[in-house]
Amino acid sequence: MYEDKDVRVEKRETKEDRGLVASTFIKYTAYLVIFFGIIWFIISYLLPMIQ
């Protein structure tokens, strides 16, 4: 009477939250600016003091 059916349900989550992507981009951009600022400070001020 009843037929057994094999049913597969796929649930896919996509990470396309634009707010999350934008905040992550801003965060890593800030990290890069701070990193290059420290490198610039070392090259401009600390290396001439050593020589």
Image (cartoon, rainbow, N blue to C red):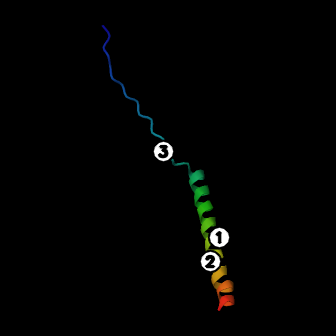
- Three-letter code, disc 2: Ile
Q: Which residue is mark 1?
A: 34
Pointers 2 and 1 in contact (C-beta within 8 Å): no
Circle 2 Cα neighbour tier, 10 Å, few/some/many (<14 / 14–19 / ≥20): few
Residue occupying image coordinates x 63% and y 65%:
30
Residue 14 is tagged as 3
Q: Residue at x 61, y 56 (%)?
A: 23
User: Looking at the image, do the residues carrying marks 3 and 2 touch, with CB atoms under 8 Å apart?
Assistant: no
Looking at the image, which residue sits at the far bottom? 51
Cα–Cα span, label 2 and label 1: 9 Å
Q: Badges 3 and 1: C-beta atoms under 8 Å apart?
A: no
Disc 3 and disc 1: Cα gap in Å? 31 Å
- Residue position marked by numbered label 2 in the rendering: 39
Dot 1 amino acid type:
Ile
Q: Is residue 49 above or below residue 14?
A: below
Q: Secondary structure at mark 3?
A: loop
Q: Height in image: 12 above or below 48?
A: above
Determine the CA span between mark 3 and mark 2.
37 Å
Q: Nearer the viewer, mark 3 or mark 1?
A: 1
Task: Pinpoint residue 40: horizontal percent, then vertical percent.
Answer: 63, 80
Q: Nearer the viewer, residue 18 or 33?
A: 33
Q: Which mark is residue 49?
A: none
- Asked if residue 44 is positioned above or below residue 14 in the image, the reply reads below
> Which dot, 2 or 1, sits closer to the camera?
2
Is 22 displayed left or right of 13 in the figure?
right
Image quadrant of residue 2?
Answer: top left
Identify the amino acid type marked 3. Thr
**Circle 1 Cα neighbour tier, 10 Å, few/some/many (<14 / 14–19 / ≥20):** few
Residue at the spot 52% in from the left edge and 49% down from the top edge: 16
Disc 2 element: helix
Residue closer to the observer: 28 or 3:
28
